[in-house]
Image (cartoon, helix red, strand yellow):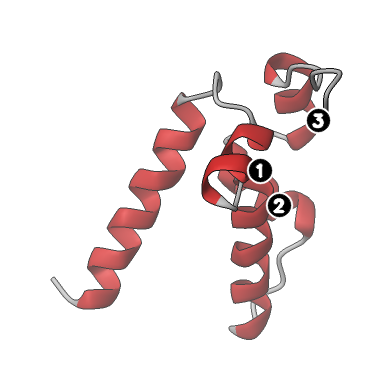
Amino acid sequence: MTKTELEAAAFRRLVSHLQERTDVQNIDLMNLAGFCRNCLSKWYAEAAVESGVDLSKDDARQRIYGMPYDHWKAQYQTPLPEDH
């Protein structure tokens, strides 16, 4: 495998892991890791634009979340604690 293929496989595994771990909130990811699913979808969309691929923000989010963003928010996002 080439470096790019290995990186792509690791990326797919990360996305799959984040899709499975719906219990982990984006705010927790941001606080602990400095990035979240939204960041990842933004980077994905930016890479598409840099490569000349037409990809909307919503399409990029759907690829990362595994479903439309609004559905994910309604189903899995919990309210922020009062101290945030």
Q: Quadrant of residue 69?
A: top right
Residue type at the position of mark 3: Asp
Query: What distance separates the C-alpha of mark 2 from that of mark 3?
Result: 12 Å
Q: How many marks?
A: 3
Do residues under tags 2 and 1 come within 8 Å of each other at their CB atoms?
yes
Residue 53 falls left or right of residue 56: left
Left or right for 70, reference 54: right
Tell me the crowding category of disc 3: few under 14, some 14 to 19, or many 20 or more residues within 10 angstroms, Cα based. few
Q: CA distance from mark 2 to mark 1?
A: 5 Å
Cβ–Cβ below 8 Å for labels 2 and 3? no
Q: State whether residue 34 is above or below residue 46.
A: above
The residue pinned by badge 2 equals 59
**Is label 1 in a helix, a strand or a loop?**
helix
Circle 2 — which element? Answer: helix
Is residue 8 visible in the rendered image? The answer is: yes
Which residue matches tag 1?
62
Question: What residue is shown with label 3?
Answer: 70
